[in-house]
Image (cartoon, rainbow, N blue to C red):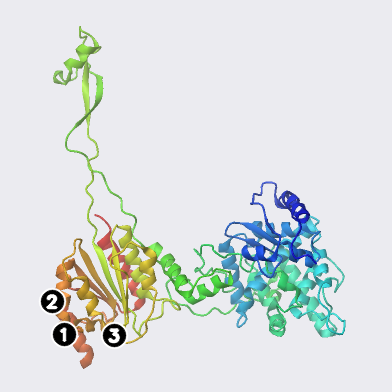
Amino acid sequence: MKKDADTALIDAWQAVWPEALAVWSKFTRLRDPSLCASHVEASKQGLSGSFAMIRLLDQSVVVDLPLVTELGLEDYALEILAHEIGHHILAPGSASDQFRLLARMRRALPTLEQHAPMVANLYTDLFINDRLQRQANLRMADIYRKLQQGREPLPDGKAKASGGVWTLYMRIYESLWQLEKGELGGAGTDSDAEERLDTDAWLGARLIRVYANDWMLAAGRFATLLLPYLVEDTGALGDSLDPSRYLQDTRDAARGCQTYGAQQIEDDEEGGAIHPVHDKRISGLDGEEPQAEVPARPAGGQLREPFELGDILKASGVDLSDHEIAIRYYRERALPHLVAFPSRPAPESQEPQMEGLEPWEIGDPLDDIDWLQSVMQSPRPVPGVTTVRRVYGREPARAIDAVPVDLDMYVDSSGSMPNPQAHTSFLTLAGAVIALSALRAGAKVQVTLWSGKNEVMQTPGFVRDEDMILGVLTEFFGGGTCFPIHRLRQTYAAKRERPAHILMISDDGISTMFDNDEIGNSGWDISAKALAQGCAGGTMALNLERDWDCAAANKWLQQTYDALKRARREQGWDIHAVERYEDLLDFARAFSRRHYIQS
């Protein structure tokens, strides 16, 4: 068997491309498909396992022609290409819809979330193939017959029985297209299993027809329908005898795509994981449609946790580390809370500027006549006819750029704080809101993340690089509590050319900044010098009781409170008590508007 596709086959498939586009619409515009002549070429294009795929990043169709030939599908160019175009036109259509789809699938597949990409692929294929088979009269059923016939036999020469997932999937197609039972896949032998298959296949077919124009809404229902079969069939999924392994054409469809919007939980997402039999639109049964139990979520909007977003993105083929996902997560969550980009009003010049001439008419002040210009127009001035006067106006003056206050931010990352890469950290979110707002105003930002002794991370000075700043904010130590006094000392060893405001985000552990440093210098002296050299004051946002400065406390906590009172009294620190970490977001918005909106 040839390993590479010959030129004739490539030319034949390329010639079919315009017809495949026209199946959906004559106005459909996609770049020509990548028809790979070898498995190596297909792999370089990001295609592996399946014989074709859609790439949502650049809306490209990729086909592994040698694998197509091995499966005996070389004569189905129109069907295969039209199917891949369907993923661009119908489902999922875009990376954001792929994220939404997988989120719904994962919610309906408890403990089996890893199979969500496969189930989502099978689900969208149903809508596309049903439309192509019935409305475009393409031979979609024949492709499944070919895949079934091409299965490798067992050593005894008999064909291996199809798994429950594949059998149900084929039975749904048979119901949709009114084919003989077992024509596309293996038939069961147990009468009870057959009855169950027939019922579930009918429900699956009804789901595809009822939700043909609203396929996203029924995604959780389809996954719930497949769930019991997945439980019974997980060991066989994807093995060398499973035909579904060739149909994963959207497995990595969203690789390289932007992730905006993926963290939002939609209103109908959590209640959509119900069995189709309980959906009146599908089953026709009367009665109230039960809602899936929705777990309690904290107030503040229906947003995913960072680990949930990471699971969805990875299932979509987005190749990012947990840290890179966290950077995107907090950047997107911060965006609605940032200050507006500064506008610069142009004041009028105090000196009037001549703009031109206009006729002087009888009744106008005599002093307004420009006699030189009037005589130049006519040596014999005629009042109201040849007389002119000058017109003056004011032009915008050159605006003077204000020097924005730089931001020097220190964020606590000790064991009492959440890991921002797993769960929402409002310290990280507040830091992102303030830092990105400062960048919008033209300031530079230095971020220091700290925990125990020698556990410190810092940007390389004051920078204007978003990724660099968010990269530090989204890291995590989770150790003890020991403020990095030496970093504060080094930053303000000499007076800065630009003013800098010092911001601390922590809890009562911030009192360690007043201890002696590693060479015996007093933290009080270092703090005072930093405020003096920064020339723009300092703020502390601390997780404390609201009335911390007058509340009774234990001995250790009282020492902390006394130190904070002294810092406020002697050095001028502006201390904000934040009772709940969630309130840090309100603090961040207020701080950003106070310091980075030009008045």
The quadrant in which the C terminus is found is bottom left
Badge 2 density bin: few <14, some 14–19, many ≥20, Cα 10 Å? few
Residue in the foreground of this view, choosing between 221 and 503: 503
Q: Amino acid at mark 2?
A: Arg
> Residue 98 at what x, y percent from top left?
59, 65
Q: Residue furthest top?
A: 380
Q: Which mark is residue 20?
A: none
Q: Is residue 195 above or below residue 390?
A: below
Q: Is residue 347 left or right of residue 263?
A: left
User: In the rendered image of this protein, does residue 378 appear above or below residue 202?
Assistant: above
Could you tell me which secondary element the residue under label 2 belongs to? helix
Determine whether label 3 and label 1 are within 8 Å by CB.
no
Residue at 85% in and 74% down = 182
User: Picture coordinates of residue 133 (x, y %)?
Assistant: 79, 60
Disc 2 + disc 1, Cβ < 8 Å: no
Q: Secondary structure at mark 1?
A: loop
Q: Which mark is residue 453?
A: 3
Instruction: Name the residue that disc number 2 marks.
Output: 569
Closer to us: 288 or 342: 342
Q: Residue at x 71, y 51 (%)?
A: 21
Q: Which residue bears the numbered disc 1?
A: 520
Could you tell me which quadrant the N terminus lies in? bottom right
